[in-house]
């Protein structure tokens, strides 16, 4: 009975995430939390909303339960109860988000309220699953015909649910991968972003890296600069590449964007090799670079600079992207008719970022965005980079400012004289003794 296998696998997936939520809740109960833990709670709420509400509950309430009601009067009350739970879950999740994103989110009182809400949410969730597994599904097995099961199976196998995403299944798998990655290791879901979760259906398809650089070599004339560099960026990740002056970081970025020839190895973008693609085709495919030194066109207006970034896009989409960039950088909207040359360094960096975003990037390549900027402005730029990541943009951030880059990166690579010498989660590298000595001046 395939439909039941799918449902059982979905329950297993939801239980894993619910267990992780409960473990976070136990920490909050003691009044301890940090921003990442609270952000993880928000992502878990989003996971339940997208996965449970829009896939799982919908298929049950719209297809499975009505078929059961049509076949038998038995279980009507139980089905009413399960339907009610489905309808209420949205409100419960909204409360979870509210507490995790509250202005006083880190205060003990709020954390205790959050812990309490998580406990109640989880109790309700466990009871709901138990009623389904112990009462509802056995009854369904008894009363549904084989044609009914076919309909249930079709509903559960459908991937065209009304999620605002090209591929809803992948979107949810990514969300789960992001949660896995953010969870402190003892609470992990038994995987990392580079290893796609491998259970039924929702996670069955491996998540393909957005960028895979394999053993790339390159240089200038007879001077070899890159000696077999490999790195990966998964969708939605913010990956940092740090290293001293002259290590080869910019050369690698130039290989990725196609302005520097590769003499060995391979580079794949969203699953396809890009060796034969011109730079312009790479931009069209969604590889957008913000160059070192920003390169804004000083005499042109800010708005024209931004529009330049959209030269590969259909005209109808440009105004919408422009609005999004202005929402992100209100100061650019205020000054949109002024020449870009009058802006401060930080604002010019915003123009350069905005211009790349106008190309609707699938991967944003940032080369030294902090270069030459005052510390306060650097903090603002990094806040924006992090915000872009949180909004789903996949980013490769090349930086000499290792501390700032590692503190916002999901994953990071250290490059020394053309070789990757270390890699790991940004926060781990920030604590690594060798990295601290070599790059953080400690
Ligand atoms: P930085 O942070 O200073 O930009 P980087 O890590 O990005 O450093 P690259 O700019 O990639 O390093 O430089 C790597 C090596 O390649 C350096 O030894 C540099 O001198 C050399 N190099 C860079 N560009 C060229 C070029 N156009 N012609 C010849 N050699 C070059």
Image (cartoon, rainbow, N blue to C red):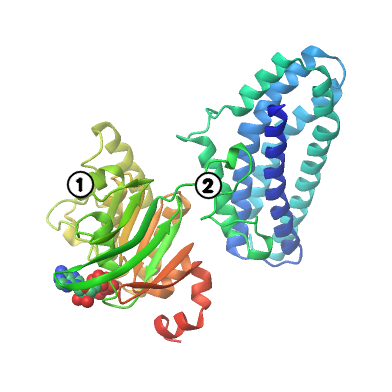
Q: Is residue 270 above or below residue 440?
A: above
Can you see residue 93? yes
| Horizontal relation, residue 29 to residue 282: left or right | right
Label 1: few (<14), some or many (≥20) within 10 Å?
A: some
Q: Count up the numbered dots.
A: 2
Q: Specify the label residue 433 is tagged with.
A: none
- The front one of 223 and 83 is 223
Write down the quadrant of residue 88 in the picture: top right
Residue at screen point 40% across, 68% down? 379
Which quadrant: the N terminus? top right
Q: Which residue is mark 2?
A: 174
In percent of width and height, residue 162 lies at 53, 29
Pointer 2: residues within 10 angstroms few (<14), some, or many (20+)? many
How far across and how far down the image is residue 290, in percent? Answer: 27, 58
Relative height, residue 147 to residue 100 (above, below): above
**Helix, strand, or loop for circle 2?**
helix
Judged left or right of residue 420, residue 22 is right
Q: Name the residue at 80% across, 13% down.
A: 71
Nearest the viewer among 9 and 356 is: 9
Residue 195 vertical placement versus 428 (above, below): above
Residue at 69 percent of width and 39 percent of height: 9
Inter-mark Cα distance, 2 to 1: 28 Å
Residue for point 73% across, 18% down: 66
User: Would the CB of label 2 be found within 8 Å of ligand 1?
Assistant: no
Q: Is residue 204 left or right of residue 218?
A: right
Ligand 1 quarter of the rendering: bottom left
Q: What residue is disc 1 on?
A: 280
Is residue 348 among the parts visible in the rendering? no
Q: Residue furthest front?
A: 264
Depicted 126 relative to depicted 27: above or below: above
Relative image position of residue 61 (x, y in whole percent): 70, 25
């Amino acid at each position: 009975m395939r439909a039941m296998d799918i449902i059982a696998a979905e329950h297993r997936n939801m239980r894993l995430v619910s267990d992780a939520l409960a473990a976070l809740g136990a920490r909050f109960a003691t009044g301890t939390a940090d921003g990442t833990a609270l952000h993880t709670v928000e992502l878990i709420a989003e996971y339940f909303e997208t996965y449970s509400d829009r896939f799982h509950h919908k298929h049950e309430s719209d297809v499975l339960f009505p078929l059961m009601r049509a076949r038998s009067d038995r279980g009507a009350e139980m089905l009413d109860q399960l339907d009610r739970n489905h309808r209420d879950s949205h409100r419960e999740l909204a409360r979870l988000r509210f507490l995790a994103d509250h202005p006083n989110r880190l205060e003990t009182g709020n954390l205790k309220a959050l812990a309490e809400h998580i406990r109640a949410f989880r109790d309700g969730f466990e009871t709901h699953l138990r009623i389904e597994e112990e009462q509802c599904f056995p009854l369904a097995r008894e009363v549904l015909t084989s044609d009914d099961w076919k309909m249930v199976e079709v509903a559960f196998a459908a991937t065209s649910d009304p999620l605002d995403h090209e591929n809803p299944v992948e979107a949810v798998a990514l969300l789960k991968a992001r949660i896995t990655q953010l969870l402190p290791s003892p609470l992990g879901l038994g995987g990392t972003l580079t290893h796609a979760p491998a259970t039924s259906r929702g996670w069955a398809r491996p998540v393909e890296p957005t960028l895979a650089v394999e053993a790339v070599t390159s240089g200038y004339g007879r001077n070899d600069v890159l000696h077999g560099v490999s790195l990966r960026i998964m969708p939605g990740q913010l990956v940092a590449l740090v290293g001293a002056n002259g290590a080869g970081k910019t050369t690698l970025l130039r290989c990725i964007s196609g302005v520097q020839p590769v003499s060995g190895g391979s580079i794949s973008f969203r699953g396809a090799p890009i060796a034969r693609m011109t730079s312009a085709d790479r931009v069209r495919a969604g590889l957008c670079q913000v160059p070192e030194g920003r390169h804004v066109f000083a005499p042109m207006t800010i708005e024209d600079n931004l529009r330049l970034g959209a030269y590969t896009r259909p005209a109808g989409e440009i105004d919408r992207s422009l609005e999004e960039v202005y929402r992100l950088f209100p100061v650019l909207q205020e000054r949109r008719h002024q020449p870009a040359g009058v802006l401060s360094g930080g604002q010019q960096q915003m123009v350069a970022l905005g211009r790349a975003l106008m190309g609707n990037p699938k991967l944003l390549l940032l080369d030294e965005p902090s270069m030459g900027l005052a510390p306060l402005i650097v903090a603002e730029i990094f806040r924006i980079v992090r915000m872009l990541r949180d909004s789903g943009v996949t980013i490769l951030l090349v930086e000499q400012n290792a501390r700032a880059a590692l503190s916002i990166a999901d994953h990071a690579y250290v490059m020394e004289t053309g070789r990757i010498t270390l890699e790991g989660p940004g926060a781990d590298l920030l604590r690594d003794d060798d990295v601290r000595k070599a790059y953080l001046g400690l």
